[in-house]
Amino acid sequence: MPKLTIEELRKEREKARKGIYLREGEFRGKIIVHMGTCGIAAGARGIVSTFLEEVEKRAVKDIAVTTSGCAGLCSREPMATVELVDTPPVKYGDLTPEKTRKIFAEHVLGGTIVADYAIGVGSEKGG
């Protein structure tokens, strides 16, 4: 593999940055399914599959589906966080494929938080 120049590395960094920060990227939102050991054991793979099926079935191009590690609430797994531009992130827990479809339709597409399934609104990172 050829070595990258400093300029090529800068371009790659900028591309990666755009995927992280929704306002600068091509996505208006992302769904993060928590895939720590506890999440996988609780069925997170099926939740990822359901979200991906909804994206494909509805031909949604501006929502990214990604995964992360443990979110620290093992008893509430499987969990996912929905992040839409200009709104606080919402963490959902105790997910099933049916709940996942409702969250996708109502929150991701419709902009309305599904309060019955939400376990937290906002970032735990602070400011």
Image: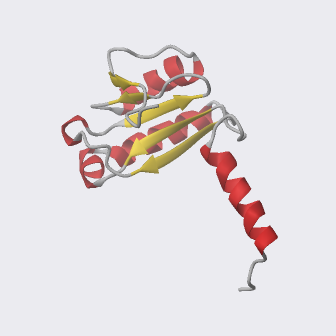
Q: x%, y% of residue 47?
A: 40, 40
Q: Is residue 25 left or right of residue 69?
A: right
> Residue at the spot x=42%, y=42% of the render?
33
Q: Relative to the observer, which residue lies in front, 50 or 37?
A: 37
112 vs 54: above or below: above
Q: x%, y% of residue 59?
A: 67, 34
State how many labels appear: 0
> Residue at the spot x=45%, y=27% of the render?
101
> Residue at the spot x=24%, y=50% of the render?
38
Q: x%, y% of residue 120?
A: 34, 25
> Residue at the spot x=24%, y=39% of the render?
73
Q: x%, y% of residue 37?
A: 27, 55
120 vs 16: above or below: above
**Image quadrant for the N terminus?**
bottom right
Q: Relative to the observer, which residue lies in front, 50 or 15?
A: 15
Q: Is residue 102 left or right of residue 74?
A: right
Colour pattern of the rendering: secondary structure
Place residue 93 in its image quadrant: top left
Q: Relative to the observer, which residue lies in front, 26 or 15?
A: 15
**Residue that lies at the very extreme toward the front in this rendered image:** 127
Q: Relative to the observer, which residue lies in front, 108 or 17?
A: 17
